[in-house]
Amino acid sequence: MKDNLVLKLMRDFAESTGLAGTGEPRRYLWTDAFAVCNFVGLYGESRDDQYLQLACRLVEQVHHVLGRHRGDDVREGWISGLSEEEGERHPTAGGLRIGKNRPERKATEPLDMQLEWERDGQYYHYLVKWIHALYRVAEATGEGRYWRWAYELAAAAHNAFCYEVGREGTKRMYWKMSIDLGRPLVPSMGQHDPLEGLVGYLELQTEGRWQSGNALDLDGAVADTSAMCEEGSWRTEDPLGIGGLLDAASRLASLVFDRGVERRSLLRQVLTEARVSLNAFDRSGALAGSPDERLAFRELGLAIGLEGIRLARSRVEHAPDLLSVIDDLLAHQTLAEQIESFWSEPTHHENPTWEEHREINSVMLATSLAPAGYSYHVK
């Protein structure tokens, strides 16, 4: 039953967004990052090449749609400014658009935060998700170009979004940038952006398989995000944010215990603050509301994060201080089951909040039900 639902969700996604069939491709970076991982996971479980082909085709579409200027923009070509030939070789060198329906805010227009949610541009945390997706395709295909594109995207994102504040040169990050990465659209910093960026950078930096002769220097990016994480506060009441913390913690556990990365104190802090956040969320009764009072993708982010923590438990079995926190987190595993069961019910899709975010909801439900593609752990 669960496997059949995952296949249906992903087939419907492929058809509705132009990945399969003859329809015009409609790409959205966050959703597509999870979808790539889902197809990689389906390939890993079935060894059916059609799923790996879909993952690779989706990467190609994302790069050719979101790596280029919008059809309603006076600008043309790759958003990086590279020539057609060079852009094909380096499609992530200028970042990737979000894929929002409305064009980005002009430099002369005032900031309207409500409207900004609907406007295009670049989000740092979306770029980090795509780095993860490219990394998973590199793992599945054994092709270093996907790893190189992830590396080039990491370098481009950090160079554009990170900036100095004050005389002491304290580093911060913009939350949203323009399509060409030339100006900030929202100057505030996402609460978890430095943490998510650091984890992604460390995974790339410590992967030796494709390093020789191809590596860009991420030392500065690691140093900058590490410094920002030293001042970070991770507690949140948002289920999607809690899921992101759990995901970061599970991947940090792999980096610390499999690759010897010196971030154990950060891992402990993230796990501890995730525990506080999860305890508060569980007490809130937020899952008792009706479907039209809830946002499926935010809850499903929590379910995906809990699955990652479950997979990470074996990594910390010989670290009692960390194991106790993870076991406290896993005491809430029934939340994931409750979320998955609720949103797997077709009648709960018959409301405006599901339909408004149908594709992201569907893809993240598939991720939660079959997390192997997304919730991998580095070796």
Image (cartoon, rainbow, N blue to C red):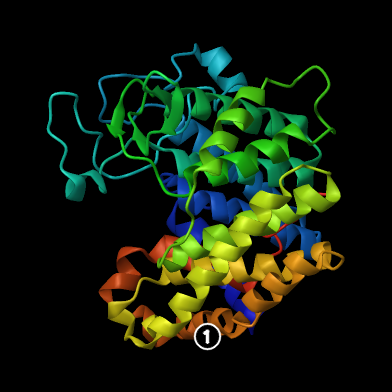
Near mark 1 (Cα within 10 A), the count class, few <14, some 14-19 or many ≥20, is few
In this rendering, position of residue 17 left or right of residue 209: left
Question: Residue 41 location in percent, x, y?
Answer: 71, 60
Task: Say whether residue 7 is visible.
Answer: no
In this rendering, position of residue 28 left or right of residue 220: left
* Along the line of sight, the residue nearer the viewer: 235 or 313: 235
Q: Secondary structure at mark 1?
A: helix
In this rendering, position of residue 47 left or right of residue 94: right
Question: Residue 287 location in percent, x, y?
Answer: 41, 83
* Along the line of sight, the residue nearer the viewer: 140 or 252: 252
Q: Which residue corresponds to mark 1? A: 338
* Along the line of sight, the residue nearer the viewer: 66 or 220: 220
Report the residue at 36% width, 71% height from top. Answer: 295
Residue 367 falls in which quadrant of the image? bottom right
Question: Residue 321 location in percent, x, y?
Answer: 75, 67
* Along the line of sight, the residue nearer the viewer: 59 or 195: 195
Report the residue at 73% width, 65% height from top. Answer: 322
In this rendering, position of residue 101 left or right of residue 171: left
